[in-house]
Image (spheres, rainbow, N blue to C red):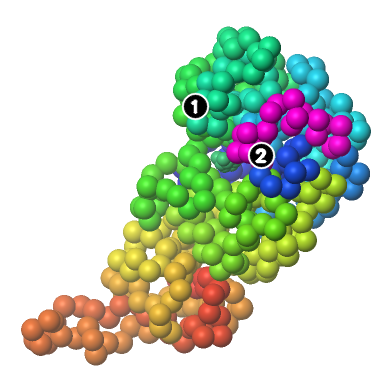
Amino acid sequence: MQRFGDQRDWFGEKRFGMFVHWGLYALNAWHEQDQWRRRIPRADYILLIDQFNPVNFDPDAWLDVAEAAGMEYICLTTKHHDGFCLWDTAQTDYNIMNTPYGKDVLRMLADACHRRNFPLCLYYSVVDWHHPNYPNQGRSHELPAPEAGDEPDFDRYRDFLVEQVRELCTNYGPIHGFWWDMNVTGVVDPSINNLIRELQPAVVINNRGFDDGDFGTPERDMTTDESRMFQQRTEACQSVGRESWGYRENEDYYSDAHLIRSIDRALARGGNYLLNVGPKPDGTLPDESVAILGRIGDWYNSVKEAFGDAQSASHKTDNTDVLLTERGDTLYVHLFREPVMSRVLLNPMDRLPARATLLNNGAALPVRNDPLPTLCMDREGKLSDAKKDYVRVTGLPVNDMAGAVMIIKLEYEG
Ligand code: GLC
């Protein structure tokens, strides 16, 4: 990833983060956009505020799970599309202080993050299904029309939003990221990100707000950028389950192999990765999500050195079944697709490394560059004198480790 040359450079070193979607919708246990996707009248939806009482919320418990998975930062939905605020905001009563719980969960999380030196990023939805001034008019992710009593007026909504941004960037200590979502108004207004940067110089800002920000946000592996190295700064995001980002009872969870491949692909292409969990209404993380993160951590922690400040280097080989990262004289080969054989060929590289190690288990792997029967002739059966003594790592435990993303470390001398 290109460096910023300022306090934002934390983002190029800490590459794997935890995304958390949490709010009133956890109570309905279906989807974070419940109000919209099931057309629940606002008057009914807002009654959830009287039930939100996450008595078992313990920010350290979330951070323990994140850290055990190898994650190094966290991003919390401070306000999702429903407009409910998870912090003690003076701009609306529709906030956590007016639930039976009555405690500022953002403050609690921020304190825990600062104590542990764990970067905290804030998600904020521009679309708002509660605020009377947000101009709901049936565009994507908007209510079909304003509700009775609303006074659509984007300028007044903007004032509200700016005051909320100011609170978030002033009252909670150092903030490391601002994650806008759903600016369906299409309004461009760089002064808003400028304000954030003034208040919080280490903040990285995504591209879903009022200007392009610092990085792109491909979601759930849907991306048109198929290059082997991201062309712009990127943070891919994904939830552990297919249907929802918020807590969903009976969620359809992804396989470990799918998630691990997705993570490896994004990180090896030079991006960051946010993996999302949706806490339950009581504040705890679903057991299935914790188990998934635990297994992902078993993989990630064993191969972590291939990421961090290692740079994307896939241009060094023509083999499109692998991605490469490098740091100094060390090259990491990522088998992000299910390998079909026990070797990997790094054509056209021909210089043998001093050592090849399978990072996942520390095993030494044989590495050769002797001629191969299928490469010594051209299609017409003529002996080829082209130089084809490519680096070939052999002995991969493709059967024993089926489903794992193997990463091979090649150490060169000099
Ligand atoms: C999707 C969802 C939204 C969620 C976001 C996270 O856009 O619709 O609810 O917050 O992904 O990236």
Amino acid on which the number 1 mark rests in the picture: Arg
Separation (CA) of disc 2 from disc 1: 17 Å
Dividing the picture into quadrants, the one containing residue 346 is bottom left
Mark 1 residue crowding within 10 angstroms, few (<14) / some (14–19) / many (20+): few
Identify the residue shown where x is 62% and y is 56%: 241
Reading the image, the residue beneath label 2 is 34
Reply above or below: 9 against 167.
Answer: below
Image location (x, y in percent) of residue 108: 85, 37
Which percent across, then down, holds residue 142?
A: 56, 27
Q: Tag 1, which secondary structure?
A: loop
Residue at image point 60% right, 78% down: 362
Mark 2–mark 1 CB contact (< 8 Å)? no
Secondary structure type for disc 2 = helix
Asked if residue 358 shows in the view, the reply is yes
When the figure is inspected, residue 1 is found, relative to residue 69, above or below; the finding is above
Is 405 left or right of 164, judged from the image as shown? left
* Quadrant location, ligand no. 1: top right
Location of mark 1 (residue): 139
Q: Is residue 411 visible?
A: no
The span picked out in magenta is: 32-52
The residue at the far bottom in this view is 373
Kindly tell me whether mark 1's CB lies below 8 Å from ligand 1: no
Q: Residue at x 50, y 38 (%)?
A: 215
Q: Name which residue lies at 46% across and 29% down.
A: 212
At label 2, the amino acid type is Asp
Q: Which of the two labelled residues, at mark 2 and mark 1, occupies the earlier sequence position?
A: 2
